[in-house]
Amino acid sequence: MKITIGCDHAGVEYKTQIINFLEKEKHDVLDVGTFGKESVDYPDYAHLVSEEVISGADFGILICGSGNGVSMAANKHKGIRAALCWSEEITKLARQHNDANIISIPARFLSLEKTKKLIKIFFTEPFEGGRHQRRVDKI
């Protein structure tokens, strides 16, 4: 799978470890930054990830402190359905019912192990379609 990942300064440590995890799983990963811990503007990275997903990446991963800001910025793009995921059930529903294509991670509130588990769920959970497709079409 082709995955694009981006973060702000609060997500740099997780991003590096997630990339290693994804590459071991044989995913093709594009890292759009940020690359340091100095304060940056999270929308810049949310827009880069969104543009890559629109252009053909299978999924995107966004990481910031709360996960909210990157989700809000990403969801400004037509065709992007970024979901803030913090539990297994929320992550499954984001894929099953909403056909989410970007997972937004709140790095300050999840362990790295939990984050990896949620990403695996996000990548493998199928969209159910049916009545949910009609709703997604209205987004």
Image (cartoon, rainbow, N blue to C red):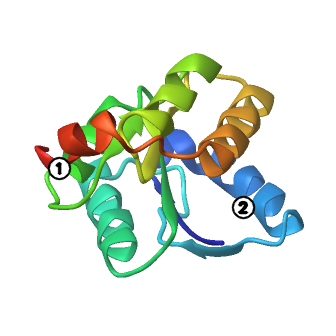
Secondary structure under tag 1 reads helix
Of badges 1 and 2, nearer the viewer stands 1
- The image shows residue 115 at horizontal and vertical percentages of 68, 34
Residue sitting at x 42%, y 80%: 56
- Answer yes or no: is residue 109 visible: no
Q: Indicate which disc residue 64 carries.
A: none
Can you name the residue that lies furthest to the bottom here?
Answer: 55
Residue that appears at 38% across and 47% down? 39
Residue 78 is drawn in which quadrant? bottom left
Answer few, some or many: residues within 10 Å of disc 1's Cα (few below 14, many 20 plus, some between 14 and 19): few
Label located before the other in sequence (1 or 2):
2
The amino acid at mark 1 is Asp
Please indicate whether residue 16 sits to the left or right of residue 77 in the image. right
The amino acid sitting under disc 2 is Ile
Q: Distance between the residues labelled 1 and 2?
A: 31 Å
Q: Residue 27 location, x and y as percent? A: 74, 71
In the image, residue 108 above or below residue 129: above
Instruction: Residue under label 1, please give it.
Output: 137
Give above or below for 121 relative to 54. above
